[in-house]
Image (cartoon, rainbow, N blue to C red):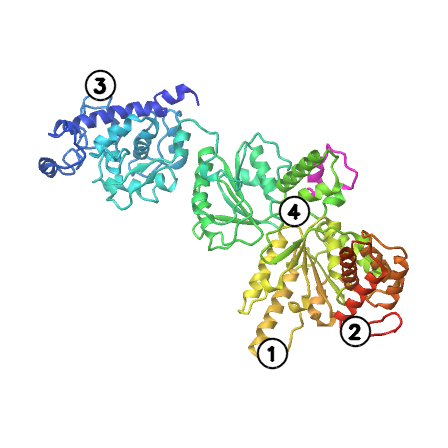
Amino acid sequence: MTGNDLTGPAGVLGLLAALRGRVAALVDARSAGDPTAGDPMRGLYVTEDTARRIAAAPGPGAGASRDGGVPFPDGGAREGDDVPVPDPGVPAGGGGVPLPGVGAPAGDGGSPLPHTDGTGRLTALSRVFGLTALDAHILVAALAPDVDRGFEALYGYLNDDVGRRRATVALALDLAGTGPFDAAARDRFHPAAPLRSGGLLEVEDEDRPLPGRALRVPERVVAYLLGDDGRLDPQLSSSEVELLDPSGDGITAPSPLGARVVAAGPVTVHLRERVPGAATDGVVAALRAAGRPVLRYRPEGVDEAVARALLREARLRGAAVVVEPLPERPGALVRVLASSGTTVVLAGTEAPDPRWAPHAELIALDAPGGTEGPGDLWHRELGSLEVDFDLDAATAPYRLSGDQVRRAARSARALAAFEGTALTLAQLQRGARLVSAPLLDSHARRIRPAVGFADLVLPEEPLGLLRELTGRARDRDRVLGEWGLRTGGGRGRGVVALFAGESGTGKTLGAEVVAGELGLDLYVVDLSSVVDKYVGETEKNLERIFAEVDRTDCVLLFDEADAVFGKRSEVKSSHDRYANLESAYLLQRLEAFDGIAVLTTNLRANIDEAFTRRLDLVVDFPFPDPGQRLSLWRSCLAGTPKAEGLDEELARCSQEFELAGGAIRSAAVTAGYLAAARGAAVTSEDVRAGARREYRKAGRLVPDAGAPWAP
């Protein structure tokens, strides 16, 4: 905004110049009949003469307000009249001119301010927020001290209190030519009236009577009226709110749904998405292509104050609001944003609740599938980089929105630049994990995978099934989505597998390998934080876990799953009944699951058959044979210093000690500690001592040299 815009007749400074003349007239009117006008202590005490003068003043309707307002020739302006503001050279009561750029208020006091000359930010503000002329006068009177310090002293005088340097309700109405005795004028300060509901005016000192309450204009509104469209409102200056200018470049093409939202005008739409951001990116692109700025809000919780500031910012900028994903119990947030005269797009994975905004027109839609696959977004963002890996295969496990793809790619490029290398698969996976990590720390333990298929010692059949599991996770969107092989009934696109085998046979390691191959983190569910003695609490905890995994990218591991997924039993007591209810919930939830989950059990027979039917794969981890045990010994001791002839001893131990992989690893660790205590390499005696200790831990007879078996 130029200087002429500010100082012209419709600009803020021009309006303040007119207001200064009105203030001067009011000062003259009050001081003329005030015997204490020259008293240096005026405003700090009330004399008897002052009290008598106030009591004897004319009442409402006699041409002046109760506290000495300036009368107009017709006995006092009302909200339905043109409110004159005297020129500084015109005596009070001798006529005046209207505030420049502001038309007359509507007769009913509630219709929008008429557009007069089409200039001035106050006119634009009045049109957007539905202000009357009286509202505009009140707003100018309230913001005056924030722009011109001279009004502080003037308002202190007019308030008869040097400490009260802001306009009060009574003073603002006096300056507008009416007074606090006018019910229609007082109604302009109601919380539901446009000034306050729109966040343009704050009424302070709620413990005082209404006429004495101070008025304050939020700094963001003052800045707007002065021509500042730069920074966001300080309440929104966080990572939760992002301003997307129309001129910005996006990586997502406008969607047909977005075009319909643009054409609909101010509308509130709820999109139910399978993956957060999958549909809103196309809507945002369409809004920006149509020249609309977009305020994108990612709330961590419900904050009504932030929501109101967000809505005010959108109306000031003519921006659309996109909220995704909606937080839990978003009713208060939706009520603030819905039916606001602004385009609002709400997105979440759950269906909307009609109780969120019962009096608002909320259009509920299921988000359509995108025309682009995940790989298309990655290629568009990383297309200029040469990589030595299959980008489509590397990014297939990630269900990221366009904005998340952009942030992940930016993070990966920054990491590659920092390390001084070309973009690698590991750097890409780290960038993707950074933006898609679930919030499961309170219910699960995160494992950053550091192993691969080369670390597994298994027969060919279970190895093949594990590779098939990774393939299902990569190709599920194509097979179940594009090819339409997903059955009905609201079933999800999740991949669930059961790993069965004795303790120590590599089930958890297998889950870590699968997560590592997919470039995802492994989250091991902490059953102690999930299972609850109170009825229904276990299901709530499980729902939080499933819901979080549904909308993020990770592999979820239920270790010892028979504790949760056990067989249903005959109902003989209330405990049996509620245990069966828990199982029934899990059966239903697995049907709609969209993530990747692995269940492990030592006893496959303990898993309910209904769960088994819903599993994609069942992988049996057999007990290792002597050859596999030798491979496990060598793998566990690969990085340790070894004494001469150790490999022959490992071969003998593999034959003599029937240990699973987990026990072999524990024995190798024991051997390493024994060698470290001597400061020497690992010897045959160290290995054999470690193996014996594992046998004793299991309560088994120990084979020993010279005596085949020893207790």
The residue indicated by pointer 4 is: 369
Q: Is residue 426 left or right of residue 147?
A: right
Quadrant occupied by the C terminus:
bottom right
Which sits in the foreground, 307 or 476? 307
Tell me where the magenta segment starts and ends, as one range: 370-390
- Which residue type does callout 1 highlight? Val
Labelled disc at residue 700: 2
Query: Considering only order in the chain, which callout, 1 or 2, is on the residue closer to the N terminus?
Result: 1
The answer to which image quadrant residue 665 occupies is bottom right
- Residue type at tag 2: Arg
Tag 3: residue type?
Gly
Foreground residue among 106 and 513: 513
Disc marking residue 571: 1
CA gap, disc 1 to disc 4? Answer: 44 Å
**Secondary element at image label 3:** loop
Viewer-nearest of discs 2 and 4: 2
Which numbered tag is attached to residue 89?
A: 3
